[in-house]
Amino acid sequence: MASSLMTRLLTAGLAALVLAAVGGCGYRAARIGGEGSALADKTVHVDIFTNKSYRPNVEAVLTNSLIDEFVRREGSRAVEAGGDLTLSGAVVSYGTAAVSYTATDTVKEYRATVTVEATLRRSDSGQVLWKGSLSAYQDFPANDDLVLQQNSEEQAIAVICRRLARELTLRMSENF
């Protein structure tokens, strides 16, 4: 009986501590670019990235992820046309490779890898403000069912593109 009461008191105390800690935390959108950043308080037009890989539609997923990243963050704003800055680039490569196997030597997981090049320019002068190349990967399960396999690969591509979009916006927003 006493241990049950002690457990309840301990649980209630921990719950109150967690609520107090979480309740004091404020959430707000991350800001793109501080003072001196190329992205600080600018409008950005994101061109549709070109696709130099064999995988169709990966450039559209990446472009949409970039637009979503600009919409989520404070400090700059994505626009359809006529922005202060223009972000353009290309999906340079896409590939998959087996990364793990079962005991019977069949593929258990694949790794999808996307490499992109991006350039941020001033729209009025064409001056390059940032240029770089990034790669990201995501593992996904192998499946005997081709439809499920393709769905897993598409989900991995979406994760990769979100990761690349986040990393690109962070790198472009660094003071330089």
Image (cartoon, grey):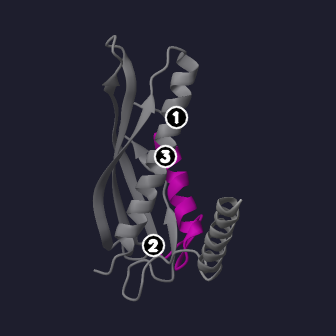
Above or below — where is 20 with respect to 152?
A: below
Query: Is residue 34 visible in this depiction of the protein?
Result: yes
On the image, which quarter does residue 132 sit in? bottom left
Question: Which residue: 44% across, 46% down?
Answer: 160
103 or 172: which is nearer to us? 103
**Range covered by the magenta-colored residues:** 57-84
- What is the secondary structure assignment of the residue under circle 1? helix
Tell me which corner region of the image, top left, top right, bottom left or bottom right, holds residue 22. Answer: bottom right
The mark nearer the N terminus, 3 or 1, is 1
Amino acid type shown at disc 3: Val
Up the image or down, 120 lies above or below 160; here it is below
Per the model, the C-alpha gap separating discs 3 and 1 is: 9 Å
Q: Which residue is mark 1?
A: 154
- Mark identifier at residue 159: 3
Going by the image, does 132 lie left or right of 63?
left
Q: Earlier in the sequence, mark 2 or mark 1?
A: 2
In this view, the residue in front, 65 or 130, is 65
Q: Position of residue 126 (x, y in %)?
A: 36, 71
Q: Specify the amino acid type for callout 2.
A: Leu
Q: Is residue 31 magenta?
A: no
- First reached walking from the N terminus: tag 3 or tag 2: 2
- Mark 2 and mark 1: Cα distance apart in space: 30 Å
What crowding class fits label 3: few (fewer than 14 Cα within 10 Å), some (14-19), or many (20 or more)?
Answer: some
Q: Which label belongs to residue 85?
A: 2
State yes or no: discs 2 and 1 in contact (Cβ < 8 Å). no
